[in-house]
Structures are given as C-alpha cells and as structure tokens.
Image (cartoon, rainbow, N blue to C red):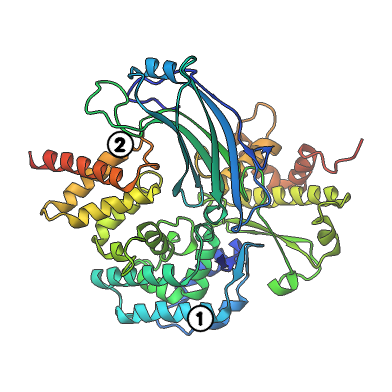
Amino acid sequence: MSTLYPRLLPAETETLFARLSDVAAGAADPSAAITTARAVYAASGGMRVHRDQLIGLREEVRRAAVDHGYPARPGVEARNGFDRRVARILHASMGLTAGEASQRQVWAYLALVLLPDVCAWRFPANDAGKFVADRFKGTDLTRHTLARLWWRAQVLRDETRVDDPYWMLEALGEADLDQVMARRRSVAATPSLVRMVVRVTAESTDATGRDVLRDLLKRLLRLTAFLDLDWLDEAELRSLVLRERAVSMANLTS
Amino acid sequence: MRAMPYPVPTSSVAPESWTLNGAPVTTVLPGWDYESLLQFERLVRVDVLKTAKEAGLDVEVPLALHVRYWATGSYVRHSAALVPLVPDATSGWAQALLVATVDGRQLAGDLVLETTLVRIDEAESGGFTARRAGSVLWNDTVKLALEGSGGLLPIAPVRFSEQGLPAAAAWYVSLDGSDWRAPAMGNLLVLLNVDNRAVADALDPTDSAAAALWDTLTVDVVCDLVGRALDDEEYVPSRADADELSTGDLVTNLIRSFLSRPGEGVDEAVARLRDERRNDPSLVRAQAQSSLRFPRTSS
C-alpha cells in the first residue's frame, strides 16, 4: 500500500517558489507550514502520511545536509555525498509507489514546504539571486532536487543484493549516473537494462571507463529505437551489454 | 510504425481490441487507484509464414508477441506478457490470447499499452534483416487517460474551510501560470468544495441536475485559463509536444476548440482575443458560452 503525500496546489507552488529567495540557508524550522500549506491528497489507494513521519523525514534529510556542510555552500564532493545518502533515505523511508512518486505536486510540496532550506542549499540561487524552477517545482522530475534522487534509487535498486540493495548508487560517479538516468524515455525506461549497464561498468577495470560508457549508451540508444528489450532475462541482457561494450572498447582503442 | 533498418511485414497481424474485465477499452480509464490490478486481454492472430517471408527471415525463426506498458508520469516500462507463436501446420497462422496485468501502483498520467511482434532468438549474421533478439516486426499502442488529461479535468473534492478558501464557494481553479511550457499535469487542479451542497450533490453520479453545474464549471475553467494566458505576455501559442501536454498547449487547444473563428489561425485568434479582452472582457466569456452551447437544454 502506498503512503500518500500532500500535493501542493499549483497556485501555492507558484507563490512559494516566488518567495524562495526569502528562505536563506539556516532559516527557521518550517514545521508549522507542514500542515498549513494548501495541499490535497489522492482520493484513495493508500494511507495519508502522518505529520510525525513528515517531520522525521525532514530531520533525516536535514541531518544529511548538515553532515555535508550545510549551511556552507556545497562543493562537488558534498553535493555528491548528500545525493547518495538522501537517495537512500527517500526511497527506503517514504513508502512511495511509483505512481505516487510520479505526482509532480508531491515533490513540489517536499521541496517548497518540507525542505525549502535544504533544497535551496543543494541548488543555490545564481549570482542574480534566481533559483531554477525545475529544481523545486516538480515540472521535470529528472531535475527536481529530491525526485531525481528517489527515481535514481527506484531504478537502480538491486533486489539480488540483500546486504545493500542500493549499492549501485555508489557504483558510478555522479556525471556517469547522470548520463545513464538522463535518457528517461529510452535506456532509462528499462530499469533492468540500466542496472545491467551499471553492473557491467562497475565490474570493468579499464581506464577508458567514462568514454566507453558514453559510447555504450549511444549504441544502446540506437538499438532501443528498433529493439524491444523489456522481455529479456538477466543473462540475455548481460550478453547484450557485454557485446555492445566490447564494440565500444574496440572503436575507442582502434 | 516507424521506419526500421530492416524489412518488416505488411498486413500479417490481425489484432482485436483490448478489453478490461470483459468490456471494450475506450480512451479513458476511470475508477482505479494504487490498489488496483487491471487485467487487459486481447486476441491477436499472426500469419507467421507471411511475416517470415516479407521480413526476409527463415520460417523457423521463433517469434513472439510481447506486451509492455508504461505510465507517462514516469515512462518506466514494465513487461506484462510474452507469448511465443506456434503456427498452425496447415494455415501458417498463429493465435495468441494476450493477458496483461497492469499494477495500479505504477500508474500516473496516461497508461500506454504496447504490443510488439518480436524475434526472440539472435542470429550471428543475417544481412539486412531483423537478426537481433527483440527486433520489432510490428507494433501497436493504445493510450488511456488516467487522470487530468485527454479531456479529463484534474479535480479534487475537498473541504474549503480546511483549505483557507471561501467556505461557501463551489470551486476554485488552482493554476501555476508562471511557466506556460511546464506540463499541464501538476500545473492545474480544480478544487471542488464538498461543503457546498450543490457541489456535493453533483458529485453523486446519479444526480440528474449535475449536468448544469458541470457545464458552468467548464465555462468557468475555460475562461479562467484562457483569461490568465491572454493577460500574460509570456504565453505564446506553440506546437504541442506529442508526449506531454504543457499548460500553454492546453490553453492553445481551448482557444482553437472554443474561441477561434472559422478559418482563423490560433496566433490571429490570440491577438484578437487579447484585444477584445482589453476592451470588453465579458465578450470573451460570452464567446465561450456560445461555443460550449451553455447552458445546454434537454431539447
């Protein structure tokens, strides 16, 4: 059963985003807004999240931010470390189904009501004082501060690894993971293919890793234009990815 | 079907329509939630010999019908059924009953069901033919609106007293109009006040007087959305993206459907409507009423 989260009303989203500049890093605890913001819930299909759960989530994510330097402006290492840890937190503790996690207004609520200070720290305003709307509003879930992390964990979760099903979140560098997950409607639309690409890449020891990965993704992107790969089992996917990777290696080293 | 880098058969697949719980599927899927398990069925017949011949494949090449689905909220695909084809020895035709179970927990936006005819083995070589496992030789898709799109207005019945909205109001159109290029889903929501007696009654599917209320709501929403767009210079009519409807696209469709004159392009319509709205805003509302035939009568 899904946990149902508040869906921030569109007009409220616009209002709160316009006020985001007032939320400086280190602003007061927004707990009061958790139940006063204008939001609705899905009519059925799950249990509404309790206020205590929302506060617990906020504390856990905020702690992750503090451990990575909040409120000081984060560098590359801090950002990557925060992302990896929060992806685990969000996916493991929120109790979301994929359907509920597809609701843009849920993520708007989380970024603009529950965690505006942390999200503003992770993706600060530019020199002109402007925040990027995609990072807060849920208009593009592949770019939203928190949604992109949940979906990354959703796609990369490895059920075969009981000891650490989220190991793939650390298997590749941030830039490489972005490369993989950005192709949302092609390669990244088949989670089993994505996981196999990450697994095979993580197993490799060659120094040309990133270039090979990019070439491999381009090859897979071309293949998914005319191949339906969603029925292949693990062994068949592995064989496909290894074969294409070998071609990428050969092309790059020739 | 898109152009493939190999020959594909023509007219060798005869699919029947999808059914859900025995009833034909339309373009809208109402009455589901995350707890639903939806079982779709269809019968598909394939002339396997014709398929192989026209695709340049050996008749022994194993083929199958595969059903996959995704929700446009996430675009993550799920395999729902794979049925290998066994052709009749005499006719060369194969028949497959496809049963696809769709998990409600995955759904948001629109549901897309795709059926593909695929090769399921891999050939070492094969020249200019479908030699790879998964090669698509035929496909079709059906798209079902789940919520807030395809003509479904996104609504949420709530108590206005709990939302800080006027307690006796009937409805409130909540819109984030700051970016007309943002997806409509999530950008627009109509709140219906269940504390308003007329609205609460109208939400009862058996209520015979509900039509008048919903007609009024429709005119209101059209005028509200279009009015806000006309007042905002950031709104520019654009070609709709095939995959995702933006808020601006939604407004453009409303203008095209209800407020354009015969032969008038949408850019001309927007320019004219902006002018009319500046000089006589009630005229735009009257035009919407006229196009929507409001109020509708039983005669």
- Where residue A76 appears, as percent x and y from the top left, is 25, 68
Q: Work out which residue is located at the far front of the displayed protein and give it.
A: B89
- Where residue B64 appears, as percent x and y from the top left, is 43, 31
Q: Work out which residue is located at the far bottom of the displayed protein and give it.
A: A28
Q: Quadrant of residue A230?
A: top left
Left or right for A247, reference A222: left
Counting residues from the N terminus, which is met first, the one under dot 2 or under dot 1? 1
Q: Work out which residue is located at the far left of the displayed protein and give it.
A: A254
Task: Tell me if I can see residue B237 in this picture.
Answer: no
Image quarter hosting the C terminus of chain B: top right
Task: Tell me if I can see residue B98 in this picture.
Answer: yes
Give the structural element (helix, strand or loop) at label 1: helix
Chain letter for the residue marked with disc 1 in the picture: A
Name the amino acid, label 1. Answer: Ile
Above or below B191: residue B16: above
Name the residue beneath numbered marker 2.
A222
Left or right for B94, reference B211: left
Graded by Cα atoms within 10 Å as few (under 14), some (14 to 19) or many (20 or more), the crowding at tag 1 reads: some
Point 26% across, 45% down: residue: A217
Q: Quadrant of residue A178?
A: bottom left
Point 79% across, 50% down: residue: B214
Name the residue beneath numbered marker 1.
A55
Chain letter for the residue marked with disc 2 in the picture: A
